Image (spheres, rainbow, N blue to C red):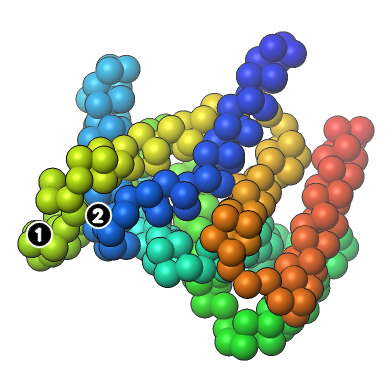
């Protein structure tokens, strides 16, 4: 692989995570639209954007022909349910002033992924991974004390996205990122339509100011573009590098929550985040060491 190709992959990867990091601000710009309307339009316009992309790249027929594979159809349906839960609870967290708690969910997601690998796939953990899990376990206790309650948004987001990643792993390389998102939003479209019809008199799309309507339409490309950049980067950049870059998004979300939205960050809560970050540093260093050992072998 040429240096320019790898550089392009790094730029694409950083672009995807930076866009995901600033996504909370985009949701907040939609004004008085509630979380249910935002997610519904996100589904609708993501589907429209992805279908348009498939048509433009002449992949529409070949992609929809994959629906003959019943296992693939079921897996994309399951992925759709999981990403709906993730989107819905994340946007509820954002509009209700819990951006920091949402960022925590994505910080601990890599650790949840490791646990799923052990519990579901029977994988064995290395010493560094066990240490990282230990940091996370202590962090959970500290954060529960710091919040004065269980940070449910964090756990739901980490759990739903972790299982979503597991389902996508089961899909393997049989479908492109665009094709998978097309099917996931296709299965969710009836749910989105039902919510929009039910709440039509109070929705902001077409009833509020033109800027809000335009921002709701923009949810399609805003959802799909980072995913496509990520898909390109994942095929051009070593996994160890992607592992480091994945922390850009929740770090930016954390900064947005604390600096822009002025969410409280008492000492106990900050200590919990520090333990999570320490675990992630251990995990990253262990991943790099393991990757180098594999290359030497």
Can residue 297 be seen? Answer: yes
Would residue 256 appear left or right of 125 to someone viewing this image?
left
Q: Position of residue 224 (x, y in %)?
A: 39, 36
Q: Dot 1: within a 10 Å radius of its alpha carbon, few (fewer than 14), some, or many (20 or more) residues?
A: some
Q: Residue at x 13, y 46 (%)?
A: 206
Would residue 297 appear left or right of 186 to someone viewing this image?
right
Per the model, the C-alpha gap separating discs 1 and 2 is: 12 Å
Between residue 11 and residue 126, name the one nearer to us. 11
User: Residue 81 sits in which quadrant?
Assistant: bottom left
Image location of residue 222, percent across then percent down: 39, 38
Please identify the quarter of the rendering in which residue 297 is found: top right
- Which tag, 1 or 2, sits closer to the chain's start? 2
Instruction: Classify residue 60 as left or right of residue 166.
Output: left
Q: Residue 240 location in percent, x, y?
A: 75, 40
Position of residue 254 relative to residue 174, above or below, is: below
Q: Which residue is mark 1?
A: 200
Asked which secondary structure carries label 2, the reply is helix
Q: Residue at x 68, y 71 (%)?
A: 265
Q: Report the front residue among 140 and 259.
A: 259
Classify mark 1: helix, strand or loop.
Answer: helix
Q: How dense is the environment of label 2, judged by Cα within 10 Å: few (below 14), some, or many (20 and up)?
A: many
Return the residue nearer the eye: 193 or 94: 94
Quadrant position of residue 151: bottom right
**Relative to residue 25, is residue 59 depicted above or below?**
above
Give the number of the mark in front: 1 or 2.
Answer: 1
Residue 182 visible from this viewpoint: no
At 25% from the left and 26% from the top, the residue drawn is 52
- Location of the N terminus (image quadrant): top right
209 vs 91: above or below: above
Q: What residue is disc 2 on?
A: 40
260 left or right, relative to 288: left
């Amino acid at each position: 692989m040429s240096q320019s190709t790898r550089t392009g992959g790094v730029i694409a990867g950083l672009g995807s995570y930076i866009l995901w990091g600033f996504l909370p601000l985009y949701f907040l710009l939609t004004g008085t639209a509630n979380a249910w309307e935002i997610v519904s339009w996100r589904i609708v316009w993501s589907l429209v954007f992805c279908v348009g992309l498939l048509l433009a790249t002449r992949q529409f027929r070949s992609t929809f022909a994959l629906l003959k594979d019943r296992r693939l159809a079921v897996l994309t349906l399951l992925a759709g349910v999981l990403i709906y839960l993730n989107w819905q609870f994340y946007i509820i967290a954002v509009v209700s002033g819990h951006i920091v708690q949402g960022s925590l969910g994505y910080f601990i997601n890599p650790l949840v992924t490791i646990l799923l690998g052990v519990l579901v796939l029977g994988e064995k953990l290395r010493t560094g991974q066990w240490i990282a899990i230990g940091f996370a376990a202590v962090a959970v206790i500290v954060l529960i004390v710091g919040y004065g309650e269980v940070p449910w948004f964090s756990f739901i987001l980490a759990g739903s996205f972790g299982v979503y990643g597991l389902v996508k792993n089961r899909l393997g390389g049989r479908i492109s990122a665009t094709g998978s998102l097309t099917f996931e939003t296709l299965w969710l479209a009836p749910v989105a339509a039902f919510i929009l019809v039910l709440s039509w008199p109070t929705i902001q799309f077409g009833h509020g100011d033109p800027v809000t309507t335009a921002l709701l339409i923009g949810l399609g490309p805003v959802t799909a573009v980072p995913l496509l950049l990520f898909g390109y980067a994942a095929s051009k950049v070593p996994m160890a590098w992607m592992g480091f870059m994945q922390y850009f998004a929740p770090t930016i979300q954390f900064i947005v929550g604390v600096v822009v939205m002025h969410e409280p960050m008492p000492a106990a809560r900050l200590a919990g985040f520090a333990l999570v970050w320490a675990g992630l540093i251990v995990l990253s260093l262990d991943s790099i060491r393991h990757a180098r050992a594999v290359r030497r072998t």
